Amino acid sequence: MTNENLLKVVYNYFPKGIDCIKEKKIYVETKEYKRLSNHIKSFNNPYSKEIDIFIEEIKNLNFPNFSFNDSSYFEWEDRCYTFEFCKEINGESFILRVYLSILKPYFTIKFFKINVENDRHIYNIISSKSFPEEKLILELKNILEKHSYKEFDESLLSERIFDINFQDINMGEFTFFNAFFVNQLI
């Protein structure tokens, strides 16, 4: 996985130098955007057999008191499946979120601790070492790799791609995480 190879994939789906916010009419007519939109639409239907099998394997993991949620939003033009494992421990809520890119078979895993302040849920990113079930992380990675997914290089996730943007992300602030997964800050 090199920066150059990743950029080739990104430029296949996101037009260079056209600002999605300021030039929306031009942006949505580009071949790159149309390719991305059609690709996403092909996933916005019942799961493929491969994803069904993967989800069943995940659900069959023996981790008591974890709830499993599918938080995928292809209708919002996310570029990934998003699966969450949630658990409450001593009054604290933890989430392990698995992102599976639909552009290329890459995944990344993020960990959150949820704090409630004034009836608002605040998601704080935490390190994998702070997540209460390290065994779950290892088993998930084994399942993903068995299904030919590769872990996205963590050091590249927040690297900016200065000549593209998408939806509400300003030109110059779009990252590899945004390109391959979702429009979130990490």
Image (cartoon, grey):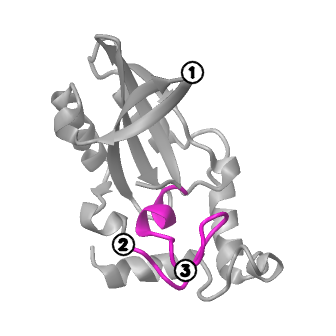
Could you tell me which quadrant the N terminus lies in? bottom left
Q: Residues within 10 Å of mark 2 (few under 14, many from 20)?
A: some
List the residue tagged with mark 3.
12
Label 1, label 3: how many angstroms apart (C-alpha)?
Answer: 42 Å
Query: What residue is rendered at 37% in x and 65% in y?
Result: 158
List the residue tagged with mark 1.
119
Q: Nearer the viewer, residue 105 or 115?
A: 115
Could you tell me which quadrant the C terminus lies in? bottom left
Query: What residue is rendered at 30% in x and 60% in y?
Result: 152
Do the CB atoms of the residues marked 1 and 3 lie less than 8 Å apart? Answer: no
The amino acid sitting under disc 1 is Asp
Q: Residues within 10 Å of mark 3 (few under 14, many from 20)?
A: some
List the residue tagged with mark 2.
159
Helix, strand or loop: magenta stretch: loop
Q: Position of residue 17 (x, y in %)?
A: 61, 89
The amino acid sitting under disc 3 is Asn
Q: As displayed, is residue 138 above or below residue 62?
A: below
Going from N to C along the chain, the mark reached first, 1 or 3, is 3
- For the residue labelled by badge 3, is the local secondary structure a helix, a strand or a loop? helix
Instruction: Name the quadrant containing residue 127.
Output: top left
Is residue 139 visible in this depiction of the protein? no
Label 1, label 2: how many angstroms apart (C-alpha)?
Answer: 34 Å
Which range of residues does the magenta coloring cover? 160-183
Is residue 89 visible in this depiction of the protein? yes
